[in-house]
Image (cartoon, helix red, strand yellow):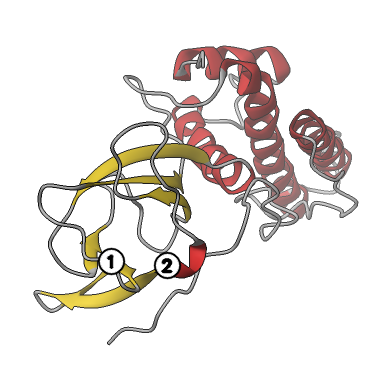
Amino acid sequence: MATGTKADILDAVGQLCRTDSPEFVAAGLTVFLANAVRQYSRDKPYEDVEDVTGSAAKLQATPASWVEEWSQIRKIVYPYVDEDSTTLEQDDYEIDTVPSGGVPVEKIRFRSAEPAATETVRVWFSRPHDCTDSTCTVPANDVSALAHLVAAKVETAKASYFLGLKDQAQTADLIDYGAKSGQAKALAKMHLDAYRDALGLPDSDKTIPAGVAGDVDTDPQYTPYVSHQRHHRARQR
């Protein structure tokens, strides 16, 4: 699948909103992008697949790219030999949190299987997207959508900025900072709806507070691309 680049996304943001105005620090654009990628990853996680070598025990290491307290298993094929190998049932394994060197870590615990060191366990799982100068996992056809989400965050920050100026403005000040804050808030809502529409998410029907300069995320629990919730997360033993 073709992917975009960080430069592609930032260029698209520049077409959607001003990022060179006095109230906006250009260096902060990377922060807005990082926040947007985090939200995008919740809405449409990166689907990865990695092989894990057996440990001759029920407890197996998670894939190298696994993100604890975030990643979810999509499916496991064991023993993996070729594309016709058997896919395990969800009840055949669970994610368990166990102590390791005094630090809790997540492991894959098989109910009955004990993969040998000569066997391969192929794991499909979700994780956050990467979007750095060197690596970007955002599909090319989602670059525009993500740019709208970054723009929404930029406009929300501007709304907060103008709201602060309104509170500080003198009576004789001819600039209506309240109106400018409202305009920026409306633009943030427009960009957020464009992002949701592009990904097929429900339209946002909530008003974005002008004083909120952080993540624009009106429905953080909505994850339509997650096929099931984390399966059998066991308590730390």
Q: Tell me the SS state at disc 2.
A: helix
Labels 2 and 1: the sequence-earlier one: 2
Please tell me in which quadrant of the rendered image residue 136 appears: top left
Residue at screen point 44% across, 56% down: 88
**Residue furthest to the bottom:** 237
Does residue 229 lie above or below 11 as drawn?
below
Does residue 63 lie above or below 197 as drawn?
below
- Nearest the eye: 202 or 11: 202
Q: Is residue 233 left or right of residue 169?
A: left
**Label drawn at residue 16:** none
The residue where tag 2 is placed is 92
Tell me if residue 38 can be seen: yes
The residue where tag 1 is placed is 113
Residue at screen point 33% across, 32% down: 82
Please tell me in which quadrant of the rendered image residue 11 appears: top right
Measured as percent of width and height from the top left, residue 14 is found at 62, 15
Q: Is residue 232 left or right of residue 49?
A: right
Measured as percent of width and height from the top left, residue 12 is found at 63, 14
Does residue 226 lie above or below 102 as drawn?
above
Q: Is residue 45 left or right of residue 188?
A: left
Q: Which amino acid, mark 2?
A: Asp
Measured as percent of width and height from the top left, residue 232 is found at 48, 74
Q: Which amino acid, mark 1?
A: Ala
Tell me if residue 175 can be seen: no
- Nearest the eye: 160 or 127: 127
Measured as percent of width and height from the top left, residue 40 is found at 60, 40
Do labels 2 and 1 touch, CB within 8 Å? Answer: yes
Estimate the spatial distance between the alpha carbons at disc 2 and disc 1, rounded to whole Å. 8 Å
Residue at screen point 52% across, 33% down: 33
